[in-house]
Image: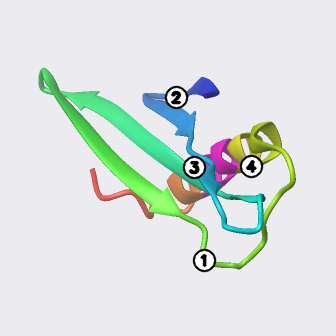
Amino acid sequence: MITEQFGEYTLTGLPGRKGSQRYSVGVIIEKNKDGLKNKQIFQAEDGICYILAIEAAKEGINLGKNLIKQNRVGF
């Protein structure tokens, strides 16, 4: 899995295996706040899948960055 720091957040790509031997896009977003680790998992619902897990993981990181920029993370 790919993990990347983005500001105060830690993003981990979370590719999901599809039956067609392709990978969907997902991301785990974590943030330490007041000594507690907050964690939220997001899955893309656009139906786009990738042949390689690394491609889906990289897109998951991009998804996480966009969610943070748009203030769509609940912590």
Q: Distance between the residues labelled 2 and 3?
A: 12 Å
Q: In the rendered image, which residue does mark 4 sit on?
A: 56
Task: Report which quarter residue 74 is drawn in.
Answer: bottom left
Residue 36 is left or right of residue 71, and the answer is: left
Q: Which of marks 3 and 1 is in front?
A: 1
**Which residues, given as a range, are shown in magenta?**
60-66
Q: Distance between the residues labelled 4 and 1?
A: 13 Å
The answer to whether residue 16 is magenta is no
**What residue is shown at x 43% (from left), y 42% (from top)?**
29
Q: Compare marks 3 and 1 and give the one earlier in the sequence.
A: 1
Residue 46, compared with residue 52, is above or below; it is below
Task: Report which quarter residue 63 is drawn in.
Answer: bottom right
Element under disc 3? helix
Q: Compare marks 4 and 1 and give the one earlier in the sequence.
A: 1
Q: In the rendered image, which residue does mark 3 sit on?
A: 64
User: Badge 3: few (under 14), some or many (20 or more) residues near its Cα, within 10 Å?
Assistant: many
Q: Compare marks 2 and 1 and give the one earlier in the sequence.
A: 2
User: Badge 4: few (under 14), some or many (20 or more) residues near its Cα, within 10 Å?
Assistant: many
Q: Compare marks 2 and 3 and give the one earlier in the sequence.
A: 2
The amino acid beneath tag 3 is Gly
Residue 39 is left or right of residue 20, and the answer is: left
Q: Do the residues labelled 3 and 1 touch (CB within 8 Å)?
A: no
Q: How far apart are marks 2 and 1 (CA)?
A: 25 Å
Q: Do the residues labelled 2 and 1 touch (CB within 8 Å)?
A: no
Q: In the rendered image, which residue does mark 1 sit on?
A: 45
